Amino acid sequence: MNKNFYITTPIYYPSAKPHMGHAYSSIIADFFARAKKIQGFKVFFLTGTDEHGLKIQRAAEKKGMNPKDFCDQISITFKDLSKTLNLTNNDFIRTTEKRHLKSVQNLWNILEQRNEIYLSKYSGWYSVSDEAFYSNDEIEDIDGIKKSKSSGSLVEWVEEESYFFKLSKWQKPLLDFYKKNPNFILPKSRKNEVVSFVKAGLKDLSVSRKSFSWGIKVPSNNEHVIYVWLDALTNYLSALNYPDINNHLYKNFWPASLHLIGKDILRFHAIYWPAFLLAADIPLPNRIYGHGWILSGEEKMSKSRGNILDPIKIIEKYGLDPLRYYLIKEVSFGNDGNISQEKLENCINSDLANNYGNLCQRIIAFNEKNLNLMIPNEINFKDIDLKILNDFSLNYQNLIKYLDNQDLNSYINYIVEKLFASNKYFNDEEPWKCKDDKIRLNTIIYVALELIRKITILLYPIIPETSLKVLKIFEIDENKIHLETIKDNNFLKLGQKIKKLSILFKKIDTND
Ligand code: MSP
């Protein structure tokens, strides 16, 4: 079994500072990176910024800056955000880097050599905001203004000489590939969307622009810059040192295991990207997962709509782990979801403070009072104890399946269920009434500590900082977290000391 895992986020346009939608893509990718790590995989996690094209050129012009200086300034805010979000990314790629230029020009040359690209003329609609070409039936006229039907962004008429990629020729191979690899695009609904689009017929794709210069030059014709999406998608290869396919990164990590993207950029990843790769005879990634949007009210959160929520401000006020938890639990993965301060506060109070925080705090406090912060040294499991403990080993394969299928909703639901069950176990077993039955008292405490340990390991990819704090009381550091150990009911060493635990989540007064 291949124990390497390569996961990517989309590379973000540094046209403006990051917002909650960008933070969402990154946090979810970090969740999967961490989940794979604790399953023993070697993980390569990539994120970065997409810095070429007309969108960036115009944004820089608006500020009276040259595009490179402009990108330098904003790209750093994305890099900083990845630190603030505690991402475990191994690399942060910028498409203005030399290593990327080399990769893109190389891929272009291969496509040209293989006769997949030809010179012609483009006339049609273009959206600078989406950096996308649209056909006549994909746009609409609203009060004399032409817009893309799918994204609502303005389109402008373009007529210029352009290189074309023979996309039409890949229609059948793509459909065959989707059929053979039914989980290539997830969730299923998005796959169906892509398949019907491809079935309707693919036109050759314009892959160069001549009327502006901010991009990577076509190697054989300096008057053209390469279409920003062909440029951007190649980042997934350039970070692995492509075209040097014998280096250890490319060898170990290509093809990518998971390109995590937002649903708005599905066409580029699920149609254009595999077609470019097929045409260049490069293996295709294993999976494209298109997640939903973070909405503000009913609308997609985006800079152009002016309805953005700054993740840094939310983290300053509430902390990182509560935000990560909220986005993973309250936004049903695959669908659109909402975030507001009120909802976040309710989630912190009910799930983190009352449920998880309370479980940890009360059990450690009870242990301190009765056993002076020691793991009991004599225990005897009853059926009721084994029932709740064994549930983790019984469901282990299911949990792995949830992770493999990106079924985040089932994964988190399992944890929430176990939290309720564990609090209920402690209430029902009433260890405070066992003063005369030392072994029963010890056993209940031991089971409760094991439950905390198991649940905290499951929570690690979601709330890593808090999880590490809790695991530390058992002397489990980050490199000793192994998901498999949740199957073990006797992991904690009898008689060993544990550490005190400070408050994990403060309850928020929602009347403030
Ligand atoms: N630069 C391209 C991606 C190139 S990948 C080879 C791009 N950049 S973007 O900055 O506009 O968006 C990056 C990612 O952020 C996309 O996956 C997009 O879906 C996501 N989000 C931007 N706003 C979002 C929300 N409001 N909600 C969730 N994610 C959204 O597209």
Image (cartoon, rainbow, N blue to C red):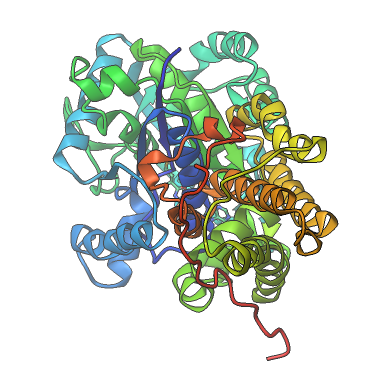
Query: Image quadrant of residue 215?
Result: top left
Q: Is residue 460 above or below residue 201?
A: below
The residue depicted at 39 percent of the width and 37 percent of the height is 229
In percent of the image, x 29 and y 48: which residue is there?
Answer: 52
**Residue 146 in view, yes or no:** no
Above or below, 510 relative to 179: below
Q: Nearer the viewer, residue 129 or 96?
A: 96
Q: Is residue 336 left or right of residue 92?
A: right
Residue 350 pos. (x, y %): 73, 67
* Front position in the image: 186 or 109: 186
> For the point 50% across and 57% down, which residue is it?
470
Q: Position of residue 261 (x, y in %)?
A: 52, 41
The quadrant of the image that shows the C terminus is bottom right
Q: Residue furthest front?
A: 436
In this picture, residue 144 sits left or right of residue 241: right
Residue drawn 74% across the image and 35% down it: 386
